[in-house]
Amino acid sequence: MSHRPFAGKKLVVASHNMGKVREIRDLLNPFGVEPISAGELGLPEPVEDGLTFIANAEIKSLAAAKASGEIALSDDSGFAVEALNGDPGIYSARWAGPKKDFSFAMRTVKEKLDEKEAFASGNLKAAFFCALSLAWPDGHTETFEGRVDGLFTWPPRGTNGFGYDPVFTPNGKSVTFAEMEPADKLAINHRADAFRQLIDACFGNG
């Protein structure tokens, strides 16, 4: 399957989350691309009414590409807990409420796991998913999905990272994402997995 290559230096990142924008900027740095966030351009946030990470990523990238006239990249990512049937999943940000309070969201996950007696049964499997969508103003999209598996960890540990990072310990590690140095997290996380696919397909000559 042939992919459309990215050509240009300017890329709009369809996100108002500066933590995500920083990670994307670090990942694209080697390619001489300078990302500008949708927030910096004052672009509105579209309604994310897709039922999958990929659908929501495409809604955001297409809206930003059409509004800015530039190629746009969006990321729709979330935290999925096996014992909760994949929740919070695509609603990961929504669980943090209007104030984006992720300490509240993490506590909610813990309470729901208590209701399921997940700690007693030992089923604390969790994963982060990331769908990346690159969209052109003509409506063409290239979309990729990455994941990283691990365990829900309580209590939260670490002050690096953002979102659910303090309660996620990736497989093979003894520290949470929020305890890792940003570069170490970036090397193995769900966004890096999706980025490797994106870069191979669209930035291949990097």
Image (tube, grey):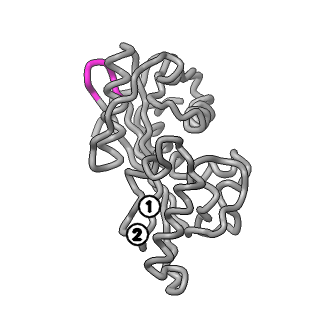
Query: What residue is drawn where x is 56% and y is 55%?
Result: 104
Query: What residue is drawn where x is 56% and y is 47%?
Result: 101
Residue beneath label 2, please? 84
Q: Where is residue 37 in the image (x, y as percent from the top left)?
A: 52, 24
For residue 85, which quarter of the picture?
Answer: bottom left
Q: In this view, does 107 lie to the left or right of 95?
A: right
Q: Position of residue 69 (x, y in %)?
A: 36, 13
Residue beneath label 1, please? 80
Query: Mark 1 touching mark 2, by CB under 8 A?
Result: yes
Q: In this view, does 25 lie to the left or right of 85?
A: right
- The quarter of the picture where the C terminus appears is top right
Say whether residue 111 is visible: yes
- The quarter of the picture where the N terminus appears is top left
Q: Position of residue 38 (x, y in %)?
A: 47, 23
Say whether residue 146 is visible: no
Crowding at dot 2, Cα within 10 Å, few <14 / some 14-19 / many 20+, comes out as: some
* In the depicted structure, whether residue 11 falls above or below residue 109: above
Kind of residue indicated by mark 2: Leu
Q: Which of 180 and 44 is in front in this view?
A: 44
Query: What residue is drawn where x is 59% and y is 30%?
Result: 25
Query: Tag 1, which secondary structure?
Result: strand
* In the depicted structure, whether residue 39 falls above or below residue 98: above
Q: Which residue lies furthest to the bottom in this view?
A: 121
- Is residue 138 covered in magenta? yes
Kind of residue indicated by mark 1: Ala
Query: What residue is drawn where x is 40% and y is 37%?
Result: 201
Which residues are the magenta region?
Answer: 135-140
Q: How far separated are the C-alphas under marks 1 and 2?
A: 8 Å
Dominant secondary structure of the residues highlighted in magenta in the image? loop
Q: Where is residue 90 in the image (x, y as percent from the top left)?
A: 38, 51
